[in-house]
Amino acid sequence: MCAKTRKFERYDVLGRIESEELSSFPGTLIDISLNGCKIHYSNPVAVSLEEEYTIKVKFTDQSLNKPITLICQPMWAKEDSGSTDIGMKFLHSPDTDTLQEYIKYLYKDSQNLGDIAHQIMDSECQFI
């Protein structure tokens, strides 16, 4: 789906995905938004677009200390050369509130990127 037609902004965030319903091997979170995510598996995964799946997401950036549990429905799946990419839509989940707070954190963090250039340009050297 084209980024211009997306309802919510996606953030490139890495994480570990665990879902026994999908695969006995962990997957990798590629990106996330308020209403969905993209998951990559290094192995073939049989996905039903009519089923709901429970996933646990552990973010690699350590901004959340514990995994969040989300209930998802696959919107698309693509298998290529033995690996599988899945586009998930989030349904009402036990950790929906935590996801919303995390997305707010990602949004604020993305807005602060311009501040870095400002800090570098206006900084003074300090010798210790």
Image (tube, rainbow, N blue to C red):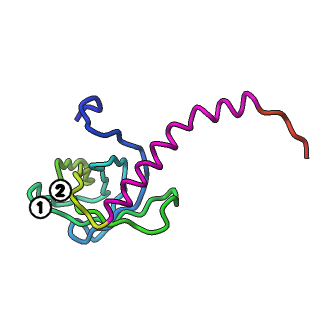
Q: Label 1 sits on what residue type?
A: Glu
Q: Are marks 2 and 1 in contact (CB under 8 Å)?
A: yes
In the figure, is residue 15 to the left or right of 48? Answer: right
Among the two numbered marks 2 and 1 on one chain, the one whose residue lies closer to the N terminus: 1
Q: Secondary structure at mark 2?
A: strand
Q: Secondary structure at mark 1?
A: loop
In the figure, is residue 123 to the left or right of 25? Answer: right
User: Is 87 rendered above or below residue 16?
Assistant: above
- Indicate the position of residue 104 as horizontal and vertical percent values: 43, 48
Q: Quadrant of residue 9?
A: top left
- Indicate the position of residue 61 as horizontal and vertical percent values: 51, 56
Q: Residue sitting at 42 percent across and 57 percent down?
A: 15
Q: Quadrant of the N terminus?
A: top left
Which region shows up in magenta? Answer: 95-122
Q: Where is mark 1, residue-wise?
A: 51
Reply yes or no: does residue 114 show up in magenta.
yes
Reply yes or no: does residue 63 show up in magenta.
no
For the stretch drawn in magenta, the main secondary structure is helix
Q: Label 2 sits on what residue type?
A: Gln
Q: Residue sitting at 27 percent across and 59 percent down?
A: 43
Residue found farthest to the left: 50
- Indicate the position of residue 105 as horizontal and vertical percent values: 47, 49
* The one of 1 and 64 positioned closer to us in this rendering: 64
Where residue 73 is drawn, which disc sits there? 2
